[in-house]
Amino acid sequence: MKIFLDTANLDEIRKGADWGIVDGVTTNPSLIAKEGRPIEEQVRMICDIVDGDISAEVVATEASEMIREGQKLAKIHKNIVVKLPLIRDGIKACAALSKEGIRTNVTLCFSANQALLAAKAGAYIISPFVGRLDDISHDGMELIHNICTIYENYGFKTQVLAASLRHPLHVQDSALAGAHIGTMPFKVLDMLFNHPLTDRGLDQFLKDHAKAFQETGAKR
Ligand code: G3P
């Protein structure tokens, strides 16, 4: 499963990229707004840090405006993927942009039928929101399973990007379900490293090593 960071914060993206495990970045208007720079400027800077798919979302809600905005965003950098909300006009814009060879990420997906529509429109990525479904007592992970099954049944090329992942178990379950991509906040990515037995084991290794070589005075 590819790992994407779900943030527009450059420090977080630099830290993640430095580990060598970040395959791409997803942003949305809320995440861009937090950073205080125009979207064009912010995503260009993100493209300079990570060489992978970088999603930039349109804010128009009418198809022809979405298409214009998408074309403009796609010109910023070759790695830009145009993010479109899963509304009727968004699907129409997705079909048009896909025909032009512009890659799209259809977002705010909360049902398997919506994901089917996005795939039919030629979406490059579909973004089902796991955490937000869990928030309203629906099983977010079941949606990832269902979309993966439907896409496999019909050979759709659209990649399933598990979004709104809030904790490490969401990441593990998305990978088990067969999601192609998982996008997560930096905090969640950082948590994936943690295991108390790793810390305890390393501590013991280093203590044993230090003790042996201090006692014998042997060279390492
Ligand atoms: O980028 C969209 C999605 O990942 C948002 O997550 O935690 O705000 O539901 P969340």
Image: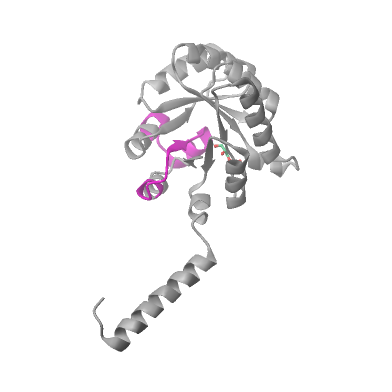
In the picture, measured across the screen, residue 142 lies left or right of residue 83, that is: right
In the picture, measured across the screen, residue 110 lies left or right of residue 126, that is: right
Q: Which residue lies most toward the bottom here?
A: 215
- Look at the picture and state if 186 lies above or below 127: below
Q: Is residue 39 magenta?
A: yes
In the picture, measured across the screen, residue 90 lies left or right of residue 15, that is: right
Ligand 1 is found in the corner quadrant, namely top right
- Look at the picture and state if 165 lies above or below 28: below
**Picture coordinates of residue 64, whole percent (x, y):** 52, 11
Name the residue rendered at 32%, 36% in the picture: 48
**Picture coordinates of residue 124, whole percent (x, y):** 51, 23
Name the residue rendered at 76%, 43% in the picture: 137
**Picture coordinates of residue 169, whole percent (x, y):** 61, 50
- How many numbered discs? 0
Name the residue rendered at 70%, 43% in the picture: 134
Residue 89 lies in quadrant: top right
Magenta part of the protein: which range? 16-42
User: In the image shown, does 101 or 48 lie closer to the viewer?
Assistant: 101
**Picture coordinates of residue 22, whole percent (x, y):** 42, 43
- Look at the picture and state if 199 lies above or below 33: below
